[in-house]
Image (cartoon, rainbow, N blue to C red):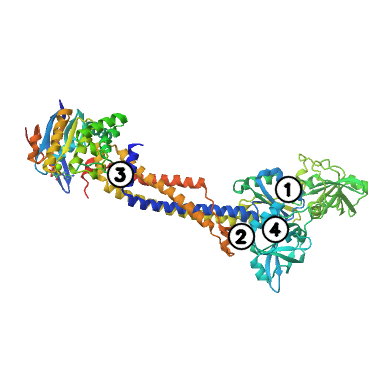
Amino acid sequence: MNVIEITGVKKNYPLGTTTVHALRGVDLQVAKGSFLSIIGPSGSGKTTLLNIIGCIDSPSAGSAKIQGHEITALNDRQITDLRLHKIGFIFQTFNLIPVLNVRENVEFPLLLMRKYSKKEIDTRVEKLIKGVGLSEYIAHKPAELSGGQRQRVAIARALVTNPDIVLADEPTANLDSETSEAILQLMRDLNETEKTTFIFSTHDPEVLKYAKNIVKIKDGLIVGQE
Amino acid sequence: MGLITMLSIRNLLRQKKRNILLGIGIAFGMMILVIANSFSHGMVDVLINDVVSHAFGHLVVNGKPANSYYSTIRDKERIMKIIHESIPKEEIVTIEESLGMFGRAIGNGEADNVVVVGVKPETDNDQADFFEEFFTLVEGDFSNYFSKEIEYPVIISEEKAKSLKVKINDTIRVRLPMITGQMQAVKLTVIAIANANNSFMNIILFMEADRVKKLLGYKPWESADLQITLKDPKKTAKKYAEILHSKLNPEVISISGQVAEEPAFLLAFQNNSAAKNVLKKNLKLTQGDLEKGLAKKGVMVSNILAQKLGLQPGSKFIYQYETKFRGLREEKLTVDAIYQSHSALGQNVVLVNEEVIHENLNRYLPKTLDSTLVASSNSLHSILATEWKLLERSDNVDALKKKYKTEKKRKSKQNNFDLITMYEGASQILQMEYVLNMITGIAVLVLFFIILVGVINTLRMTIKERTREIGTVRAIGMQKKDVRNMFIIETLILTALSCIAGVVLGMGVIKGLSLIEFNTTNFLSVILKNKHLYFKPSIMILSSYFLFIMMLTGIITYFPARKAAKLTAVEALRHYE
Ligand SMILES: Nc1ncnc2c1ncn2[C@@H]1O[C@H](COP(=O)(O)OP(=O)(O)OP(=O)(O)O)[C@@H](O)[C@H]1O
Ligand SMILES: [Mg+2]
């Protein structure tokens, strides 16, 4: 079963008098439990594609179905709700909330859901923090963590809601190679144990060895898939 | 605590410097507001309860002939009774006679204008309070105020003592007009030099009320203006004015007495053409001249009475009646006309123009006015004159002045009664309230601008700095309205805390300022109460300001916060500075 079905998606950005064609007609199906890497040179449209999959941007043309929901048909409140429940984000720049400590950052999406008890939240959050190896840092603020530790917190936050898809746009670009490998290994392990679908972009060929599937993109078009 | 509120508080603590600065601004504005408001509130309190109530009264009953300067209420007891019937006892603080007059005083070789005012504290307790609260003694002894050995003991201000060059026990010669219109010269003895705590009052020579009353020529049963000091004047002055006004209605002049042992009634008709026309239609003359009988000095007698006493036009006779305070009164009258006795008026009747009787009636008040003699349903009742004219109530000082101007033109000896509240009589003083409210209004404006500029600026900076964060939380799944509320709650908490700090600060400043003693006697001392600045914070008003400021902050914050929340997640995440 496909969690993502994208057909003929185009994305145009008006830029002054011209138009930038960031995506020129992309078709992509992603099966549940995939560990997919999107690779391509800078400016090829990776981020644009991930944003559309992540429902934080909408296509100029074409259709994008996430878990069977046609996102172009939903309003802002519904899309926001969809993101909260179905999608986890991992950012290149980590994007933790600076005023919250590790525990609070991780539980943040669960609190937004407003449906779990304090006990349920605590159990889930502590398990995930332990899973990313940060139990000792549970009360630390993001400013007191290293880059790798921050990204682990971000991974825990992305997974805390048990999403169908986790999207990571160049998750290791700001990390050294050793830490990068550890992060990717962690994501891969979670993909195995939790059966979560992972899609991440990269332009680092080193990273590719962790990928189960690879999509190559160039100038807004998919040029290869393996 | 909700997630949104928690985030707001954390974020508030994050940019400490900026928020503290804004907080200080708001707190400062609120402090000024508290001080200004408490001050103006205190001032109004002083004005209404001290200045107006002492110098004027919240409600004044004034009774005087249309064109006289002095007020004379001829029957104090009766009017007092009406006052007590109209206003509940617990609403009245005092009822005092307004005894005062301008005069020219000569001290030791120096002359100056003064006002002699009669004040009489009722009980021993009041006396101590009165002197203590009202004056600051410079020299002398207040107890001589009541001394029997001294004929006219007075308290004089330091300023006046200086200008008249007088010391304790010196005499001041004053020439004063009496209510009768005569001038008289009296010698006053200075028993104390003391400053009234309100510099309005420093031209006043204070003397015991009874002595002033006698000096002015009032009879013991008469009274000057009655000044009523109310407990809650702002609320009740107008209301009780209306009630009292409705009960001050005069009776028609119908006096029972006798002419040469024969019981007879004296009725007075109104000196106007409407009343005279009614009489012309209804009365049949048997002897004499009707025009003469209806004229200003006109006296008419019924043919039945005339027959019994053998009266002819031109005959002189004496009408006798029992007065309330002065025994039997003999009114000398001359017959102008004799009319056919009219069933509506009765048989033994002397019918006079009101102007024949008013002046003497005021001085020789009849024991009773037999108003049942001519029933009010009677056709001729409407032509009967009344013992006084009750003037219409005036709403403001201009209406009052206009009313007096018309009354001055009325050539009548009839007494007028008028009811004046502080809103007409002391409107100039009360106008200070508007000025004071304006001060508070300006303080509100200042605060408004601090909040407007401060909040909007701070919010703009905050939103700019946190745009990527907004993008993050929106991507994760926070709804627009939560993002918006986060910013609103943040500023509301800051404003609320600052306002509270401002109130505390303001109270502190007020406490401090009211401790300072001012020893000034110049004009500025008007704003002082017992030599201190007087503040009266109103919790009601301050809490409504608080609510108003919170609402204002909410409104001011709403639009930028909503704009920030409207950013799409991609736009916000891409934000780069
Ligand atoms: N908001 C925008 N306005 C105009 N052009 C844009 C905008 N966002 C992206 N683009 C353009 O769209 C194209 C694709 O950009 P995108 O960010 O998807 O590339 P990418 O593959 O993620 O690149 P990188 O590897 O450098 O992150 C680029 O040519 C970029 O300049
Ligand atoms: Mg990119």
Q: Secondary structure at mark 1?
A: helix
Question: The disc labelled 2 sits on which kind of residue?
Answer: Asn
Q: Which mark is residue B408?
A: 4
- Counting residues from the N terminus, which is met first, the one under dot 4 or under dot 3? 4
Whether disc 4's CB lies below 8 Å from ligand 1 is answered: no
Question: The disc labelled 4 sits on which kind of residue?
Answer: Lys
**Dots 1, 3 in contact, CB < 8 A:** no
Mark 2 burial class by Cα count in 10 Å: few <14, some 14-19, many 20+:
many
Separation (CA) of disc 1 from disc 3: 69 Å
Separation (CA) of disc 2 from disc 1: 29 Å
Question: Are marks 4 and 3 in one subunit?
Answer: yes
Q: Secondary structure at mark 3?
A: helix
Q: Which residue is mark 1?
A: B80
Q: How many marks?
A: 4
x, y percent for residue B77? 76, 48
Q: Which residue is mark 3?
A: B563
Residue for point 21% across, 48% down: B576
**Front residue of this view, candidates B513 and A47:** B513
Separation (CA) of disc 4 from disc 1: 26 Å
- Counting residues from the N terminus, which is met first, the one under dot 4 or under dot 1? 1
